Amino acid sequence: MRTKKRGIVQAALCLTAAASLVISGGLAEAKGTAASAKATTKAKNVILFVGDGMGTAQRDAIRLNTVGLNGKLQMDDMPYSAFLRTHSTTAVTDSAAAGTAIASGVKTYNGAVGVDVNKKPVKTVLEVAKGLGKSTGLVTTSQITDATPAVFGSHVEDRSQQSKIAKQYLDNSKVDVLLGGGEDFWYPAGNPGKFADHPAEDPTEESKGTEGNLVDHAKKLGYQYVTSKEELKQAKNGKILGLFANEEMFQQKPEGEGDVYNPVVPLKDMTQKALDTLSTNKKGFFLMVEEEGTDEMAHENNAKLTIKAGQELDKAVGVAKEFAKKHPDTLVLVLADHETGGFTLEGVDDKDESGDGISKEDGPFSIFGSKEQFYVDWTTSGHTGVDIPLTAMGSGAELFTGVHENTYVHDAILKAWGLKK
């Protein structure tokens, strides 16, 4: 048992989930219920942020470490807020089922990507946007074909079919901007592409595509292919495919065991490039931006890098908010698909040394602007079934108040576009 020599204002960490979420008066300021709210301005653009696995406690930890007890994160400093229930056809969801609910308004089984319980394709908000003549984009620090981006632009029975997902992006949903990791699924075995097979940081990574050379296929379809920060910066407006790692753009491992969060292109830079590119369409755009590190690091009960990934997400949200201020017909949403880790915040208590293995207490972490500290404790290395917070600003943001099933996000986005479900 280690001795903890630090202090904390205990009451500051005993926040309830509801109190934590009512940032900027979110629920209190909402005018009317979400069911009766009417968007005063039709949204032209929608920017949807997904902090994968990021529950209320994670947002609190990111806030405390970044801006302190009384500060506000970019993702929290929004006028409207809500809670989303996350269950799939079972009580605890995975990212594929939760993402499908958000993207298509349909509850389905865990592992399903863009299909219902009968394995039939369901239309996504990205596909709706494309039908309206809008540009579309997917950005993530995970594989671009991982579950969360996949549910917006593909339809497969199992999330593991990542090469099929990539091919559908190109041939079916025709996503304009694709930025993330996962090059391994775009090249067939034996063709390592830009990133070497079996790298020292993770020897298991290697090209494993099942649909031929999809990078060449993308180039023939007019995509600019980029693999570095400089190449992305130089890419011209139009269709862009950026793959910046073999798999995820980080190494998810327990703390001190090879864990690294240092994407070669920061999430905020990918977000900025996507906005610069997509916003040239006068009809508007739909953009989904995911931070995967908040989930993968939580699976490893690695609080240090869970918080760091959340801080990078918040910087990307800041980029989107600056865009929205200049383009008031833009709706910005920040949410999660589910919570990961049973993450909780604790004060200093020498008598409380709960957990063992990777689930032991993590910390201490500093509270910005003070000498106080906090600890993180875990209950699982998997997902949990708790509700997750959502914050919103811009055109149609008043639709996002109250407590809803996650399917409501799809319905409300359509309403913000002036459409019926």
Image (cartoon, rainbow, N blue to C red):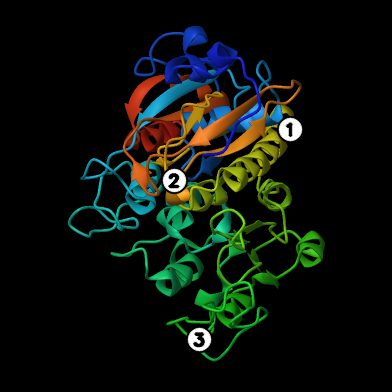
Q: At numbered mark 3, what does the secondary structure look like: helix, strand or loop?
A: loop
Whichever of labels 3 and 1 marks the residue nearer the N terminus, that label is 3
Q: Position of residue 84 (x, y in %)?
A: 37, 30
| Horizontal side, residue 398 vs residue 256: left or right | left
The local secondary structure at tag 1 comes to helix
Does residue 128 lie above or below 259 as drawn? above
Q: Find disc 2 in the rendering and name its residue.
A: 359
- Of the residues tagged 2 and 3, which is closer to the observer? 2
Residue wearing tag 3: 188
Amino acid residing under circle 1: Glu
**Tag 2 near tag 3, CB within 8 Å:** no
Left or right, 368 with respect to 172, comes to right
Identify residue for label 1.
322
Answer few, some or many: residues within 10 Å of disc 3's Cα (few below 14, many 20 plus, some between 14 and 19).
some
Q: Is residue 294 left or right of residue 88?
A: right
| Three-letter residue code for mark 2 | Ser
Point 25% across, 49% down: residue: 108
Q: Pinpoint residue 53: horizontal percent, then vertical percent.
A: 46, 43
Which corner quadrant of the image does residue 306 belong to?
Answer: top right
Instruction: Give the residue drawn at x 64%, y 70%.
Output: 223
For marks 2 and 1 on the same chain, the one whose residue lies earlier in the sequence: 1
Residue 365 % position (x, y) = 65, 34
